[in-house]
């Protein structure tokens, strides 16, 4: 993990932990805390990676938020005993061949396992100055073919007049057959392309800390910086988990019909892989990347000094499934 602007990010993480002391929505479960700051665009690029804080930008000349999309993805974490010692994911090796006594992670073992992709939460692009922010959420289920399902909560941190708002959209990998040299299906020479289609976003909903399903999601503070008497600074998070649930057209017929027993309603978005390409002898639905969430920040209703805290709790597991995201149930 690397922080090139360490003081800023350290203060952010310490502050986020303090907030949670009075408001963990799901105590007892693994969780991640994310902070979204609105920061002046003129302050320059924020060089950081691997942290839990990100920066939406405000252009003081144009007096508007710099347009930004927040891409949220997951990878199926598959825990592996790389060195065959019967232990999984020990502390990363401090040296080429094991620990030394001056390592912080010294445990006397050599050739420890590293941590596989998908096991850690981090912003891989934390600065929205270039128009996008990328967040990779961790999977806490170590089984291949299974993903940890999550509950998502949000609240604004600051004065009541500050607001953070965005549209939620679904996107997924689409796999298509691009070449079959011998013209015969399932002979192993087929070429398949699997990629995201950014033109095929499916709108799911709208989130605003000022009003989400009739709730105000703001941790209010007074003008002097202390918690206001109204709510005492303990305003609950708004539960936005439903924005991560989608209907899935499993049989790929283009029609969603859950009553027929083929299609699925209200599935966790990151549990949806792509449909299998029947012309190949490989099941692409369990080999391609998972679906992703895209937050399209509302430049009009997000204010210049907004700060939002997002709490992600890993409370369950879901088996990966092939299919095409159809939309949000009831829409």
Image (cartoon, helix red, strand yellow):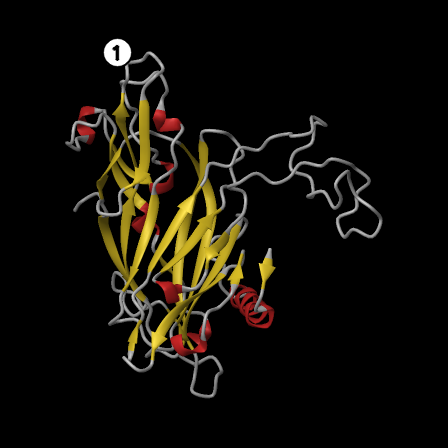
Callout 1: SS: loop
On the rendered image, what quadrant is the N terminus found in? bottom right
Say if 118 sits above or below 309 in the image: above
Tell me the residue that label 1 is attached to: 184
Q: How many marks?
A: 1
Q: Is residue 204 above or below residue 252?
A: below
**Label 1: few (<14), some (14–19) or many (≥20) C-alpha neighbours in 10 Å:** few
Name, please, the residue furthest toward the bottom: 224
Task: From the top left corner, tell me how far across and down residue 155 is, in percent.
Answer: 39, 65
Q: Residue 191 at what x, y percent from top left?
A: 32, 24
Image quarter of residue 56: bottom left
Which residue is found at the position 51% from the left and 30% from the top? Answer: 143
Counting from the top left corner in percent of width and height, residue 275 is at 29, 28
* Image position of 98 with respect to 49: above or below: above
- Nearer to me, 260 or 41: 41
- Asked if residue 217 is positioned above or below residue 101 in the image, the reply reads below
Q: Residue at 39% x, 36% y: name it.
A: 289
Left or right, 119 with respect to 298, comes to: right
Residue extending farthest right: 101
Task: Using the image as rendered, state which of residue 237 and residue 291 is in the foreground.
Answer: 291
Whole-percent x and y of residue 78?
A: 53, 33
Residue pictured at 49% horizontal, 82% vertical: 226
């Amino acid at each position: 993990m690397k922080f090139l602007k360490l003081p800023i990010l350290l203060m952010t993480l310490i502050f986020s932990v303090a907030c949670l002391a009075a408001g963990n929505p799901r105590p007892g479960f693994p969780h991640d805390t994310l902070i979204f700051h609105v920061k002046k665009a003129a302050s320059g690029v924020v060089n950081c990676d691997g942290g839990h804080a990100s920066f939406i930008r405000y252009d003081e000349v144009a007096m508007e938020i710099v347009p930004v999309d927040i891409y949220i993805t997951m990878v199926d974490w598959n825990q592996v005993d790389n060195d065959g010692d019967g232990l999984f994911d020990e502390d990363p090796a401090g040296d080429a061949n094991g620990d030394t006594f001056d390592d912080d992670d010294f445990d006397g073992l050599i050739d420890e396992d590293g941590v596989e992709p998908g096991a850690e939460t981090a912003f891989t692009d934390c600065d929205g100055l270039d128009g996008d922010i990328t967040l990779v959420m961790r999977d806490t289920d170590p089984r291949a073919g299974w993903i940890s399902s999550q509950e998502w909560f949000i609240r604004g941190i600051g004065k009541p007049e500050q607001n953070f708002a965005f549209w939620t959209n679904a996107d997924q990998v689409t796999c298509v057959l691009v070449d079959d040299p011998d013209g015969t299906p399932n002979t192993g020479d087929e070429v398949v392309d699997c990629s995201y289609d950014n033109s095929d976003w499916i709108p799911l909903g709208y989130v605003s800390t000022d009003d989400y399903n009739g709730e105000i999601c703001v941790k209010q503070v007074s003008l002097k910086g202390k918690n206001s008497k109204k709510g005492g600074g303990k305003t609950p998070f708004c539960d936005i988990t439903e924005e991560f649930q989608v209907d899935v057209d499993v049989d790929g017929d283009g029609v969603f019909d859950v009553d027929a027993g083929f299609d699925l309603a209200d599935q966790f978005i990151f549990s949806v892989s792509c449909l299998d390409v029947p012309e190949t002898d490989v099941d692409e639905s369990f080999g391609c990347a998972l679906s992703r969430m895209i937050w399209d920040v509302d430049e009009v209703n997000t204010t210049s000094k907004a700060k939002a805290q997002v709490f992600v709790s890993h409370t369950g597991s879901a088996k990966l499934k092939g299919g095409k995201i159809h939309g949000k149930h009831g829409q």
